Amino acid sequence: MSTIDQRDTDDRTDRVDGREPLLEVTDLQKHFPVHSGLFASVRFDRDSGGLPVRFDESSVKAVDGVSFSVEPGETLGVVGESGCGKSTLARTIVGLEEPTAGEVRFDGERTDEIEESEFRKRTQMVFQDPQSSLNGRRKIGHIIEDPLEGAGWEKSRRQERSLELLEQVGLKREYYNRYPHEFSGGQRQRINLARSLSINPDLVIADEPVSGLDVSVQAQILNLMDDLQEEYGLTYLLISHDLSVVRYIADRVAVMYLGEFVELSPTEELFTDQHHPYTRSLLRSVPNPDPDQPGVQSVLGGTVPSASNPPRGCRFHTRCPDFILPDGFSSDGYEAYERLLDDVRDRTIDADANEPSAVVDAYLGDSDGIPTAARGDAERAVERALEGEWATARETLEAHESVCQSTAPALESTAAGRVAACHLEVDEGGDSREP
Amino acid sequence: MSLLEVEDLRTYFFTADGIVQAVDGVSFEVDTGESLGIVGESGAGKSVAVKSIMGLIRDPGRVVDGSIRFDGRELTDLSERELRQEIRGNEIAIIFQDAMSALNPVFTVGSQIEEVIVENTDRSPKEARSRAVELLDDVGIPDPEQRIDEYPHQYSGGMQQRAMIAMALACDPRLIIADEPTTALDVTIQAGILDLFDDIQEKYETSMVYVTHDLGVVREVCDRVGVMYLGNMVECAPYDELYRNPKHPYTQSLLNSVVTPDETLDEIDPIGGTMPSAVSPPSGCRFRTRCPAAFDDCSKATPPSYDVGEDDPHEVACLLYDETVSRAEPALHESNTDTDPAESGGTADD
């Protein structure tokens, strides 16, 4: 029963020597169906060949192909706006959600093949809300002991360990018999940390552990997490919306947007030089209290698009301040061209108009920001469209689309230990174009 | 005379556990066109202070003492009815953190704004509608003519907050009170709203009291800032002056604990412990239990405010700045209590 300590210590030594990643995530996906249930997804569809019904299979792609690895003793921060999928990522890694595709390897083994109790012993999660993640009817000493009880520790040893942990997280041994409501938010998060450490895990996944706490308390908890990491040789995966928090504690940072990583970089480098326009915009949005530093710049228009129907190509292109215009287009010209393309896609071009050139003029006008080739193709496309060949029309127009819309950029190396997914960065043989 | 003068405000809550002295002797002023930030940790009494101005304190709370003068008129003497008809909405508007709960889900955004306009001004319903479109346009809602007829749930979080701001502006208030209006929003959305506050102040010349826990936000929208701790205003100064030259030990610790994107772990020195309960606050200076520079006299009486500013007023409520009090020289800049977690976790419950 109590061989855990022995085994853990052995494992840890092996790993540090071997330098294998503790956590390895490969192409992880988690999609949630928009409609669940037997009939909820049935749609009427008169155009279908057989029965006039079809199934709505759309899904929210909360995590859509994420790969990374975390070294033992390292802290990896994952940042992103709300709805980007960072919490789902954490929950899928620990097994609270079943992945749609991809695999998670822990210490070299696939997590779905490791015995569950074994994996749970070595991976613990700390949640955001210290209020609701502690059972209000139980003494905190017992709450801290829970994972140990699951691991089969005897009562007296459990209590001993619990008292020891209380001290380690900066609380008093006398608090053992108190209830969660007697503690402040910061203290409750300390209790959560004590509980997650009780079983002596290797990996702690913390989902927004300090949001909702006051700044001074935040700093205390982050300091404590740092101390505990040193003491226990912990590996952290830290999920946060707050770039400052990540800066403070992470060794490397991944920036997530609409279910994908757009940039992954050592922390210092990320904060001094961003290789993805999204990261840059995010950083410029953080208010800095220092009047000598630049103020907030609101560079991102619009809102995060829906994850059930993410934009084509680069998912960030709809809000990107550095959107790449196709050669020869002005931004007004391209906007007009896109309106035409959108209407061709939606099949909403006025079919009464018989003269293709008249239609093209109505959309593109006489703006000069449109290359002749594109204008010619537009006329051909409208001709096709008026004949009802919508697909050909669309393809003709898409030939002049921006690379940001036509091709999804892959995460590619931009510097030593850094990757970013942006056409600007990998364009022209790694010759990065500064915006 | 300032537009808003709050003097020695005391708002208490009479609960079964005792009297919570949420705001205890707070004074500040806001000039026409000026924006005052109020910062502090949760429980400092920031929200209670501004809600007291609006007369929004409900049982078991009560403004027990002090004066709130708006344009020379004493608000504490007004009845609920007078407040509602003459002050709230048309003279002073308030914007809350949670826009969704402040907007009525069963009416369109437009009808809610129009209602405010018709109630508080002499515009006809038709004029009210065109004014509402104009306001939505001002706060940056795209296609206001269409979106005016949508319901709040059709708006994103950032747009709901913008709609709230449009509603607050609906009858040209002279003072806007904003209570953590961007706290629940993502930073990219927040950046847009902060820009908007700047534009509004320029266009409408409205005064503002902006409550937040985030000093970075204060820097963006406020001219002056007051720092609250456990129901007291401990320091008040122009923002840049306060940031560069903080006088009160609490302000100094607060500035040291702020995590910003250009600081790393080693550069932050959080203040130890947690704020004591407002039911039985420490005697004398309320910060003395956590203050690195505390000395004997600190426990005797609430410290008065001293003006230590050179050009503009810079008020600080701390005996360190009283030249008549003798004390051992405190080592202020090595400040900050022991950050040993064993020390910091325990204080609140003992």
Image (spheres, coloured by chain):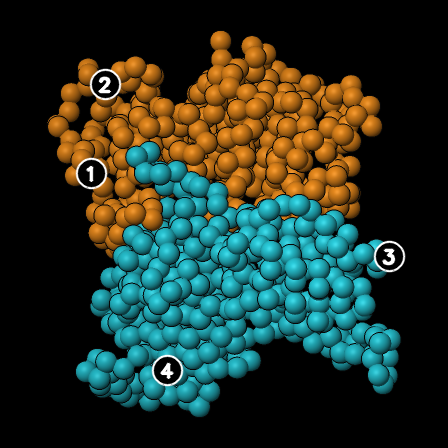
Residue at image mark 1:
B335
Question: Sequence-wise, which precedes: disc 2 or disc 1?
Answer: 2
Front tag of 4 and 1: 4
Q: Secondary structure at mark 2?
A: loop
What amino acid is labelled 2 in the image? Asp
Front tag of 2 and 4: 4
> How far separated are the C-alphas under marks 1 and 3?
78 Å
Q: Disc 1 is attached to a residue of which chain? A: B
Q: Secondary structure at mark 1?
A: loop
Q: Disc 3 is attached to a residue of which chain? A: A
Residue at image mark 4:
A106
Front tag of 2 and 3: 3
Image coords of residue B254 (percent x, y) = 32, 39
The colour of chain B is orange
Tally the numbered discs: 4
Which residue corresponds to the image point at 48% horizontal and 82% vertical from the top-left?
A: A102
Image coords of residue A198 (percent x, y) = 33, 73
What amino acid is labelled 3 in the image? Asp
The colour of chain A is cyan
